[in-house]
Amino acid sequence: MIIEENKNTIVLKNVKCLDLALTLDCGQSFRWVEEADGSWSGAAYGKYLNIKKKRNGDLIFNTTANDFNAVWRNYFDLDRDYTKICKKLKEDTLVASTIDEYYGIRILNQEPWEALVSFVISQQNNIKRIKRIIKRLCDTYGEKINDAWNTFPSAEVLSRLSVEDFEALGTGYRGKYLKKLADDVAAGKIKLEEIKMMRLEDARQALLDIYGIGMKVADCALLFGFQFIECFPVDVWMKRVLEFYPNGLPACFKGYEGIAQQYLFHWARNNL
């Protein structure tokens, strides 16, 4: 990967395995919008970004060098060797064909708080509706970044809301879960950064102990918000996929189960 700085843009050359549409619109993050020119706009860690992939493969980040290094380099997992990982995963026949068809999916390293709230909202929900709810949440209670984008509101801000305030955003029965979660994180009863430093099994149990969080939400938050790349969330689609693995996940997945899961999840949604 070659990084070039040009005024308020960063150009990345020779980036392997990063398809913007497959990565930003696959159900792991809910704040990205495809623009008319084919670029993508979104916000994370209090920063706005517009990013576009040129025909020659160069990635154009409309951001400063400071913000690129402080936020976006890690957010897009740019220092992980996905080429090497995908080569290892392709020892499995099903994943091999899936990677060939949908090459370029990456795991986004999101903020633990945003990921946890997002996946609580995702329960029994579809992606379009999740995006609408989260947009309303950010537009109403986030801080302004620019004319079109707000930050994801903090636990302290959301703890001031009532259950009815959450429900007014369209969260439905999830409002009571979000209220308790915001209250407990704001009060320090739930320490997300400490959970991030735990072993996977302990971190999962810490999330399962939170009111309204089950296994699927916990594992999605762990993979996409707490950087447990070995976490393998299972939903209705992945239950169907696991029928292809009656003896358990293959050895080639070990350590990168979450990346394998994303390829299999995308394959399942399009083929099963």
Image (cartoon, rainbow, N blue to C red):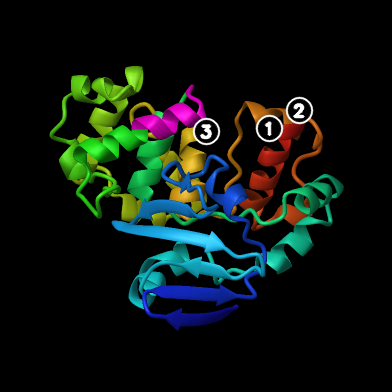
Report, in whole angstroms, how far the alpha carbon at label 3 lies from the one at label 2.
20 Å
123 within the magenta span: no
Nearer to us: label 3 or label 2? 2
User: Does 232 sit left or right of 77 as displayed?
Assistant: right
User: Which percent across, then down, holds residue 251?
Assistant: 77, 53
Residue 227 in view in this figure:
yes
Three-letter code, disc 2: Leu
Q: Check contact, mark 1 vs mark 2: CB within 8 A.
A: yes
Q: Which residue is mark 3?
A: 216
For the C terminus, give its image quadrant.
Answer: top right
User: Does 221 sit left or right of 153 as displayed?
Assistant: right
Tag of residue 272: 2
Magenta region: 124-133
From this view, report whether residue 237 is shown above or below residue 81.
above
Report, in whole angstroms, how far the alpha carbon at label 1 lies from the one at label 3.
17 Å
What residue is drawn where x is 81% and y is 34%? Answer: 244
Three-letter code, disc 3: Lys
